[in-house]
Amino acid sequence: KLMDFLRKYLKQFARTSIGVIDFINYFKSYISEIYTPQEAEDILTQIDFEAWIYSPGFPPVILDFETKGYNEAIKLAQDFIDASVDTSKALKIYSNFTVNLKGIFISHLIDNLDHIDSSKADYIDKTLHISNEINGEIIYRWLQLAIRTGQLSSPYTLA
């Protein structure tokens, strides 16, 4: 429903300069339009617009962005770092990751470079075939790890 809201919101206010009050009013009318009066009231009473917009500091609600996929990506990366990975399942798990999850997987490896040497990076690549990826973002992240661990030499030399 968020995408529907955003489409309608952008269509309504295209090429228009608006303020916070306009957004709040449109949001309230959208919620009232798609939900029953009781559901709309229940939703809107949970949102403290004053706190979200005018209070200093962090938002009043801390969001948790961890998902099952995120946790699987971190666990797989950590299993490679700890040398406790089940290689018979690793490729299947990695192959089912979205591009974002593959990025999270490699980012976790990069964040733990002090535990990864060239042979471990080579083992990860041979197991998961990361260097054969066609997505530029994945290759970019993998090259950061591969070069920094010494698995691949840098394409640049010092002048």
Image (tube, rainbow, N blue to C red):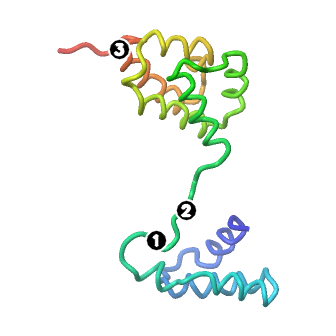
Q: Nearer the viewer, mark 1 or mark 3?
A: 1
Give residue 32's position: percent from left, percent from top: 74, 86
Q: Which labelled disc corresponds to residue 120?
A: none
Residue 38 lies, in percent from the top left, at: 78, 89
Provide the secondary structure element on which disc 2 rests. Answer: loop
Is 37 drawn above or below residue 158 in the view shown?
below
Amino acid at circle 3: Pro
Could you tell which of marks 1 and 3 lies nearer the N-terminus?
1
| Mark whose residue sits in front, 2 or 3 | 2
Residue type, mark 2 in image? Leu
Q: CA distance from mark 1 to mark 3?
A: 44 Å
What SS does tag 1 mark? loop
Residues at discs 1 and 3 in contact (Cβ within 8 Å): no
Label 3 crowd (10 A; few <14 / some 14-19 / many >=20): few
Q: CA separation, marks 2 and 1?
A: 9 Å
Instruction: Tell me which residue sits at (67%, 44%) in the image.
Output: 68
